[in-house]
Image (cartoon, rainbow, N blue to C red):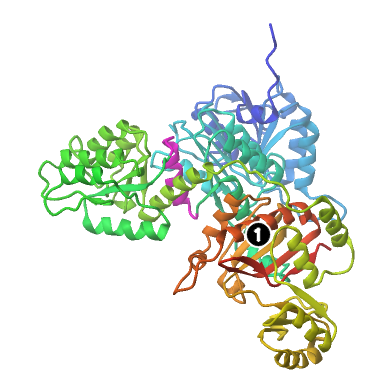
Amino acid sequence: MQEAEPRTPLERMLEARSVAVVGASARPGSVGNQVLVELIEGGFGGRVFPVNPKYEEILGRACAGSIADLEEPVDLAVLAVSNALLEEQLRAAAEAGAGSAVIFASCYEAPREGVPPLTERLARIARDAGMAVCGGNCMGFVNLERGLRAVGFYEPKGLEPGPLTFISHSGSAFSALLHNDRGLRFNLAVSSGQEIVTTAADYLRYALSHTGTRAIGLFLETVRDPASFRAALDLAAERDVPVVALKVGREALTRQMVAAHSGALAGEDGAYEALFEAHGVLRVESLDELADTLALFAQGRRAGPGGLASIHDSGGERALIVDAAAAAGVPLARITEPTVARLAAVLEEGLPPVNPLDFWGTGRNAPEIIAECARALLADPNVAAFAFSVDLTTEDSPDMGYIAIATEVCPETAKPFAMLSNFAAGIDRHDAKRLEAAGIPILEGTSTGLAAFRHLFEYRDHRALPPLTGTSPATDEARDRWRSRLSSAEPLDELEGLRLLADYGVPSTPAEVAEGVEEAVAAAARLGYPVALKTAGRGIAHKSDVGGVRLGLGSSAELVEAYRDMAPRLGRRVTVSKMAPPGVEIALGIVRDPQFGPLVLVAAGGILVELLRDRRLALPPLDEARAMRLIDRLKARPMLDGVRGAPPSDVGALARAVVGLSWLAHDLGDLIEALDANPVVCFPEGCAAVDALVIRRG
């Protein structure tokens, strides 16, 4: 008979068959007591061993003096002890053969010279023993499919397992979602804390190994192992499991490296924006939005082509949804003429057959009218998802009202179908449970509910992207040459920066360096007026800030005058460049993140680039489809289509420039701290970078 493969340390923790509670207590309300209560009353079917030399018995179970006294090595040791005892007890657990541990305590001790921090010492003990560790400074975990509750605080009894996983750096958020009264059901919830050994990436992979996991929610403060985390996100995409993230801390610090605009624009949060964009992670802004989004994805249905259709019993709330959908970026379905005719045939006089639809007239034959309207909209090929938007206050006759209609119509379609209430506090919880039992999600708020539908469509659109393809536009010779140049101690000037961009397919305006006024005039004659004159003085990053840029010089006389003003202040060395055609200014850049490496930046350009903060970031490399997604998400995007009589810009040329820049970041990003190409002027016949700042690493 073939032996089963040995379980991994993570499996021994999350699927423990035996648990030792080190620091178990008979005192009600203490962590050491509550751990035992949660294990016993939570339905754990494995063996539970209280460990504390102060007791002979706790809650009817014999108490061991130490973990070494147990008759067998346990899968999981829950350390309900203070910081002062952590190192001793974790070492004892490791020596006794425990496969894993949970650490609730903060793992803090006063720094001691020459002594590694307590977290490092604990991590070393666990890693040397091959143990998984949840925490420290965590609230533990619950595996509801296994009836396993490794927590030291009260969690509701009778929690039923479901299709969601929640992994949280916040213990309060972990507990709050377990206490939810809205039908969100979890197979696994983890308060991962400091992740001194086992990280969010490990829990992600575990959740993805279970076919019943339909969506994963994350509450993130940081990512501690970027490569493993990205690999886990790749696995989620492969298995079509949406990942919904609430990332906090974006305003905690300001990026120290602000010599380049791209560094200031990226900020502390830029890497996560790029990470989530690359992997299709759906970012939410609140726990309510997280809950609504998870509820919608827990249904397991996917949006097809088109937009949102909704039905309402109020003209005012219908108007509210129209306004809120526009603000939230949720596309409303443009229904077809056959659907319009089908709606008109059943609606009472005076009710227009449109989407969103107000179905309420006199109330006569209301159930038949509402059901037919819902069916008509759901059958429309332009409807990707459906919202039954009513306030879900207590129904007088639930067997004939909205609940009955929803539970009748929802199973008839494979399209996402949800109840959307505009007022969470008005929802009748008894009625809500009937809907949730029928598999119908309830979205509890206008803005959060619509955001959930937006995420549904974003997930659809990300998965529709073609596989990433393409190769570096630079030749091997150019790449090697620039690697050598960027490795040298000499800073790159503007002209070299433009040449670097050009070698990667980013067009630039013709330019020459001059060391005096005569050379400047000669260069302008070769380039052709009008020209721009810029200082090329060493160490001047932002030329316009010091009066080092003069644009649109139309003659040699204007050039000489500008030079004689600039040279005494900023030095004889200047750059003369041909003026780009008039157009829309976009900023492109590269900035290096300490964790995730080089990021590509696309932003509204010009002198207001940092003030407007209209930017998008991505992990390199990109192809044209992904570059176009970045451009399309800029607030300045309509400018590229032409406004107030201006001709449209060549957006395709800009997308190709972004692709080229992304390959530059991919090939040479380890040598670049930051790069600014600001502005890149976009015009009908193409685009051109007119300035470049390159800051080498180190």
Task: Note whether residue 33 is visible.
Answer: no
Picture coordinates of residue 91 (x, y %)? 78, 35
Quarter of the N terminus within the rendering: top right
Bin the neighbour count of mark 1 within 10 Å (Cα to Cα): few under 14, some 14-19, many 20 and up: many
Above or below residue 399? Residue 346 is below
Task: Note whether residue 680 is visible.
Answer: yes
Residue drawn at x 69%, y 89% is 555
Depth check: give the residue in front, 589 or 410: 589
Depth check: give the residue in front, 651 or 262: 651
Quarter of the C terminus within the rendering: bottom right
Horizontal side of residue 587 vs 324, given as left or right? right
Depth check: give the residue in front, 523 or 329: 523
Picture coordinates of residue 600 (x, y %)? 66, 58
Picture coordinates of residue 230 (x, y %)? 66, 43
Magenta part, dominant SS: helix
Q: Amino acid at mark 1?
A: Ala
Number of numbered discs: 1
Residue drawn at x 87%, y 62% is 485
Magenta stretch: includes residue 21? no
Residue drawn at x 41%, y 36% is 299
Picture coordinates of residue 599 (x, y %)? 68, 56
Numbered disc 1: secondary structure? helix
Horizontal side of residue 157 vs 689, given as left or right? left
Depth check: give the residue in front, 160 or 46: 160
Q: Which residue is mark 1?
A: 657
Magenta stretch: includes residue 286? yes
| Stretch in magenta | 285-302
Q: Quadrant of residue 383?
A: top left
